[in-house]
Image: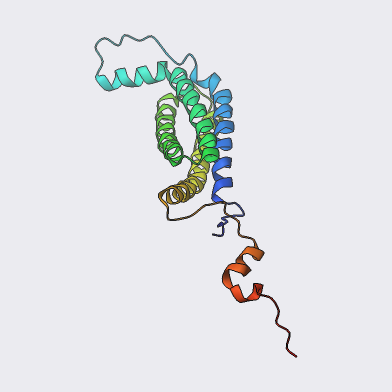
């Protein structure tokens, strides 16, 4: 079976690059967001406020801890993705896809709640640009992860013999034309 290429990459290579991208983007996000997510908590009297105000106050106060915890889990799952590519475990790829969707949804929520007027306008724009760029790139790489998970699933269920199988031209010529390997008969 010939490997398909999308934008010059196989599904396996795109999946590996997805894991590497996630590790790098997560580290960069933590470095950049560290300053803007810490100490956003103001101590207002929250005793008589509604549940939505309490939830938003909790998210604002614990934003860095939430993002740090999710980033740590994301790094672990990204490493598991790389191992899953190596060991051809399609459940690891599916776990990665589900986790990245959840991770980005939580990051959007945290971004909405921590995007306050005390931060300079340009910083808010850069934070939103970084988040949207990362989400776009995750959507791009997920295509490769889905494709490779499908290939692994099919190969494990028996429909495809092997993803990395290479057939030499000499072996295939013997298989296709058994008369070509017979001895040459002399006429004459």
Quadrant of the image occupied by residue 122: top right
Q: Quadrant of the C terminus?
A: bottom right
Relative image position of residue 108 (x, y in whole percent): 42, 32
- The image shows residue 99, relative to residue 3, as above or below, that is above
Quadrant of the image occupied by residue 32: top right
Relative image position of residue 151 (x, y in whole percent): 47, 51
Relative image position of residue 26 (x, y in whole percent): 54, 29
Nearer to us in this view, 98 or 44: 98
Relative image position of residue 166 (x, y in whole percent): 60, 56
Residue at 51 percent of width and 30 percent of height: 124
Nearer to us in this view, 7 or 146: 146
Residue at 44 percent of width and 42 percent of height: 90
Nearer to us in this view, 154 or 140: 154
49 sits to left or right of 43? left
Farthest right residue in view: 188
Q: Quadrant of the N terminus?
A: bottom right
Q: How many marks?
A: 0
Nearer to us in this view, 43 or 143: 143
């Amino acid at each position: 079976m010939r490997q398909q290429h999308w934008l010059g990459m196989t599904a396996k290579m795109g999946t590996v690059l997805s894991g590497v991208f996630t590790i790098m983007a997560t580290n960069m996000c933590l470095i950049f967001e560290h300053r803007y997510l810490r100490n956003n908590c103001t101590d207002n009297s929250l005793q008589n406020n509604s549940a939505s105000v309490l939830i938003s106050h909790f998210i604002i106060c614990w934003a860095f801890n939430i993002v740090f915890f999710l980033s740590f889990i994301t790094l672990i799952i990204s490493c598991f993705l790389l191992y899953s590519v190596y060991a051809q475990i399609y459940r690891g790829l599916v776990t990665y896809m589900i986790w990245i969707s959840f991770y980005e949804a939580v990051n959007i929520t945290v971004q909405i709640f921590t995007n306050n007027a005390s931060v300079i306008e340009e910083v808010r724009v850069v934070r939103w640009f970084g988040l949207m760029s990362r989400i776009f790139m995750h959507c791009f790489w997920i295509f490769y992860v889905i494709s490779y998970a499908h290939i692994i699933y099919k190969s494990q269920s028996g429909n495809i013999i092997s993803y990395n199988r290479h057939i030499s031209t000499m072996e295939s010529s013997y298989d296709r034309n058994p008369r070509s390997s017979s001895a040459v008969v002399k006429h004459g």
